Image (cartoon, rainbow, N blue to C red):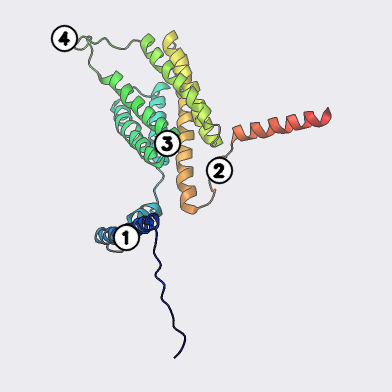
Amino acid sequence: MGPEVKMTEVRMTEPQERKAFIQGEKDEVDLSIDKSSQRQSSLELDYARVLNPAERPVQQNMASAKVANPAPLGLLGFGLTTILLNIHNTGLFPLETAVVGMGICFGGIAQFIAGLLEFYRGNTFAYVAFTSYGSFWVSLVCLWMLKNNVTNPGVAVRPTDSTYLASYLLLWGIFTLTMFFGTLRSNLVLMFVFGSLVILFALLSAGNFAKSPTTLKVAGYEGIVCGISAFYLAIAEVVNEVYESNILPIGKVDLVHLCRQRRAAKSKRARHSV
């Protein structure tokens, strides 16, 4: 017979047994979690397929969808209404319902909607500009249309005199000046729109303070130029996007970046000259 093989029994100490027991329970818990995660992922996939028959994730569809640019709508609402009102300021025709209707619908509502759409696109500057100037047009029409104690003695609301109107326009001019600095990193046409708008508010405010028809007439012609520039920028954005080419130039420039470059170059030359 061959050599006798002795079987030796390996016994674990009490700490080893406790460790093995805990490890076994941990493995079972991990396996249970993995199976639960797989079931949850399967349920989420089935739910997504029910909502989307094409079996494409909803977030992927939202990311791939092209969102239109609402800026031309806001610029047109601002530009055309500004042109129409300032034709009246030049004295060519009196204030009629055409200006009022344009101010409410296109200058006010359409421009405000464009601002809300810019909010969802994450464009803070355009959101603030369009919603603010849309509200401006609605408030201006309210100044014209609200009843007062001259036409209706029972209503205790005084009509807006030239001094209050001048203060109103001055506040909007200050706001526009602050917004102008936000255009220094955009394009030359937008800079011109806001720069000329600052001048327009200044002239209108000065004309109402001084009660000067000549100043108001000059403001009217300047306002027409401002409105035309906004109209041009709106059409340029539409045409350039349609043809995917810079057909109508708007002069894209970052003045802040250029100033920083010139300052850096100047300091570099100063260091070399020392």
Which is nearer the N-term, disc 2 or disc 3?
3
User: x and y percent of residue 260 in the render?
Assistant: 65, 32
Viewport quadrant of the N terminus: bottom left
Who's the residue at 29% across and 62% down the image? 42
Q: Which of 263 and 216 lies nearest the eye of the viewer? A: 263
Label 3, secondary structure: give it.
helix
Q: Amino acid at mark 1?
A: Glu
User: x and y percent of residue 124 in the render?
Assistant: 43, 34
The correct choice, above or below, for 146 with respect to 113 in the image is above
Which is nearer the N-term, disc 4 or disc 1?
1
Which is nearer the N-term, disc 2 or disc 1?
1
Question: Where is residue 204, by image quadrant?
Answer: top left
Toward the left, the furthest residue is 154
The tag on residue 75 is: 3
Q: Amino acid at mark 2?
A: Pro
Q: Residues within 10 Å of mark 2 (few under 14, many from 20)?
A: some
Who's the residue at 42% across and 30% down the image? 129
Label 2, secondary structure: give it.
loop
User: Which residue does the numbered mark 1 point to in the structure image?
Assistant: 28
Asked if marks 2 and 3 touch (Cβ < 8 Å), the reply is: no
Which is nearer the N-term, disc 3 or disc 4?
3
Q: How many marks?
A: 4
The correct choice, above or below, for 246 with respect to 178 in the image is below
User: Which residue does the numbered mark 2 point to in the structure image?
Assistant: 249
User: x and y percent of residue 108 in the render?
Assistant: 33, 31
Q: Nearer the viewer, mark 4 or mark 1?
A: 1
Viewport quadrant of the C terminus: top right
User: Which residue does the numbered mark 4 point to in the structure image?
Assistant: 154
Q: Please indicate whether residue 48 sits to the left or right of residue 181 in the image.
A: left
